[in-house]
Image: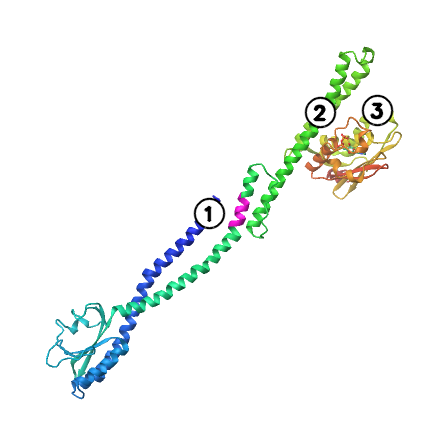
Amino acid sequence: MRRTLYLKFILAYILFGIFGFIVVATFVSNMYLDRCESTKADTLYKEATAIANSYGQDLYNSETSIDSVYRQLAALSSYNGAQIWILNPSGRVVVKSSEEIDTGSEVVVQGFNPMEMAGKLYTVGTFYGSFDEDVLTVLAPIASSYRTSGYVVMHLPMSVIQDEANQLLNIAYIELAIILLLSLIILIFFTEIVYIPLRKITQATEQYAAGNMRYPLSVESEDEMGYLAASLNYMASEIANQEDDQKKFIANVSHDFRSPLTSIRGFLEAMLDGTIPPKMHEKYLQVVLNETERLTKLTNGLLTLNSLGTKGILLNRTDFDINELIRGVAATFEQTCRKRQITIELVLTGSQLYVNADADRIQQVLYNLVDNAVKFSKDGSSVRIETTERGSKIYVSVKDSGIGIPKKDQKQIFERFYKTDLSRGKDKKGTGLGLSIVKEILKAHDENINVVSTEGVGSEFIFTLKRSALNDEIED
Ligand code: ADP
């Protein structure tokens, strides 16, 4: 396809040239010939009339001799290239500019009929067989004593007119050649502006189709071609990034599944072959149970992410009391908190604070955030959950005084499987999926989440929710 587009353009160019020459060689050539013929005939007719009114009348009024008229006409003829004859109405040649008439012999144009020329400026032919080649003939009557006593007839060979037309035609050919050469500029422009970028684009698409999504496509122009290339480039890099993400995702999933499986297998084998004595079995079975718990958590997390990842997830939006939801989530952590002497402090705005969101999903968001806050808190510290009302938004904050998150990790913690080095020792069961689930749920709600954290001091996660109109009714 690439090559034929260029060929088609060249073919169109050649056809344009050929048609140009055909048109010049036929229509233009005929136009020039007609034009030369009529202008020549016009000039000759004016000359013939002048001759008829001067030498012709003088001759018939016997004011001059045939010989003197012959010489005058011969001089005129050599000047304009036409033969000038003076004929009697019967067709007898009186004077011929080309030769001296022998007064003894009578030369007659057989069949001469001036009436045939009536209404015509000129004729083309052999003039009653007087010439071997075609000549253009004009006829002017010589009037003396109120009657036509003779005719001045002028003949110009058609070959002379044809030569003149050919000279004009040569100019037309040169003009056409110049136009063709100049139109080569269009071909150069086409090559530069359309063909070369298009070839680069098709080459790139071939590479993309072959799976080489990192193939660089550089079309710098700022026109539609440049735009098309930039769009393709963007599309390819997005696909490449997706592929990378997918590879990373699969590598992470495999890794996170493999490590608990390896340890489960290791412990079970050790128990079976007696490396771990039966009295220690309970302890290690507990480890195995923890590992299976981690696998379940991982699988559930992946399933949740998968359901959130599909475009346009359906949210079951209702107006519910976020304060009540927070109290409920805090209660589920009571047991864990008591063991570690962690207190959960609730700083809630109003007794009821309604938001419009998917309650189950927001419960999961809160659960994940509080779970992290408790997990990474120091024993004996407190976790504060706060709600604030600001305009059409409700802000929910979960703050802890735990290990904190290093600055460099703060952007990445919302990515799947991301765990900070700091947290690895503290939380062996973590999947690194909790915050990405939080992020996806809030994204589906068109809401935001931010983190403010200082390493060693603590972290605060703040997210927004849509305030419900129910709050106004309660106030009223
Ligand atoms: P996980 O299930 O491992 O907790 P998350 O996606 O919830 O995964 O969190 C990702 C990582 O972000 C955690 O492993 C931890 O390193 C860091 N992180 C999240 N919340 C906190 C917090 N409150 N304090 C300190 N680090 C945190």
**Which amino acid is tagged 1?**
Leu
Q: What residue is pinned by disc 2? A: 257
Mark 3: give few (<14), some (14-19) or many (20+) Cα within 10 Å.
few
- Check residue 105 in the rendering and tell me which mark sits there, or answer none: none
Q: Please, what secondary structure does the residue beneath circle 1 have?
A: helix
- Check residue 5 in the rendering and tell me which mark sits there, or answer none: 1
Which portion, as a residue range, is magenta? Answer: 195-202
Residue 117 placed where, x, y %?
19, 72
- Magenta stretch: dominant SS? helix
Q: Is residue 404 left or right of residue 215?
A: right
Magenta-drawn stretch contains 199: yes
Task: Identify the coloring.
Answer: rainbow
N-terminal of the pair, mark 1 or mark 2, is 1
Q: Are marks 3 and 2 in contact (CB under 8 Å)?
A: no
Q: Please, what secondary structure does the residue beneath circle 2 have?
A: helix
Foreground pick, 371 / 384: 371
Q: What residue is pinned by disc 3? A: 335
Mark 2: give few (<14), some (14-19) or many (20+) Cα within 10 Å.
some
Q: How much space separates mark 1 and mark 3, taking CA atoms?
A: 75 Å
Q: Is residue 451 left or right of residue 189?
A: right
**Which amino acid is tagged 3?**
Gln
Q: Please, what secondary structure does the residue beneath circle 3 have?
A: helix
Residue 314 in view here: no
